[in-house]
């Protein structure tokens, strides 16, 4: 059994849902050594999240952003955590709904996802800095 862990710094992106699958795979040559295993990807932030979803049609990512903005609106009178801007508390709520990690099977040195699946960085802040993910690979 092999274990490997690496922190990857993602580039700063605008608010929205961004595919990062290729970026992650490019920085994980260790995947090639695993015939069967798991890759766990964890984001070290509370106002961004990770998800797996459709990776072909960019309108899916636009629809995700529109839906979450409607579901978790800014400037609500009941928000108490407002010192960091009107997008901060909604960003925390969106991150809690979507989650801080995804786990993907590995098969024959590659992520074993469906044809139309990709890993999203879900950026919920208007002016976010670079984000960091921790990737833990285990397998044989």
Image (cartoon, rainbow, N blue to C red):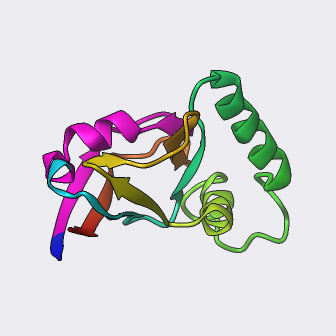
The answer to whether 33 is drawn above or below residue 62 in the figure is below
Is-magenta flag for residue 12? Answer: yes
36 and 9: which is toward the camera: 36
Q: Is residue 85 left or right of residue 108?
A: right
Q: Position of residue 52 (x, y in %)?
A: 56, 49
Closer to us: 138 or 131: 138
Q: Residue at x 31, y 45 (%)?
A: 110
Residue 119 position, x and y percent, is: 48, 45
Range of residues picked out in magenta: 4-31
For the point 23% across and 52% down, which residue is it?
8
Is 95 displayed left or right of 127 in the figure? Answer: right
In which quadrant of the rendered view does residue 2 lie?
A: bottom left
Which image quarter: residue 106?
A: bottom left
Q: Along the horizontal axis of the image, is 120 left or right of 67?
A: left
Q: Residue at x 77, y 37 (%)?
A: 66
Q: Is residue 102 above or below residue 31?
A: below
- For the question of whether residue 97 can be seen, the reply is yes
Q: Along the horizontal axis of the image, is 23 left or right of 45?
A: left
Return the x and y of residue 127 as percentages of the image width and height: 48, 41
Q: Where is residue 62 shown, x and y percent of the image?
A: 69, 30
Taking the magenta stretch, the answer to whether it contains residue 136 is: no
Which residue is found at the position 63% from the left and 61% from the top?
98
Q: Specify whether residue 15 is in view.
A: no
* Residue 62 position (above or below residue 68): above
Q: Quadrant of the N terminus?
A: bottom left
Residue 79, quarter of the rendered image: bottom right
In what quadrant of the picture does the C terminus appear? bottom left
60 or 68, which lies in front? 60
């Amino acid at each position: 059994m092999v274990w490997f862990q690496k922190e990857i710094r993602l580039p700063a992106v605008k608010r929205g849902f961004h595919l990062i699958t290729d970026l992650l795979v490019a920085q994980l040559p260790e995947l090639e050594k695993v015939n069967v295993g798991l890759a766990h990807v964890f984001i070290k932030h509370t106002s961004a999240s990770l998800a797996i979803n459709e990776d072909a049609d960019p309108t899916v990512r636009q629809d995700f952003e529109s839906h979450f903005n409607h579901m978790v609106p800014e400037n609500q009178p009941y928000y108490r955590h407002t010192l960091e801007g009107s997008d901060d508390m909604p960003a925390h709520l969106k991150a809690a709904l979507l989650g801080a990690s995804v786990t993907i099977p590995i098969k024959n040195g590659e992520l074993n996802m469906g044809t139309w699946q990709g890993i999203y960085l879900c950026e919920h802040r208007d002016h976010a800095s670079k984000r960091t993910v921790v990737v833990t690979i285990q397998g044989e």
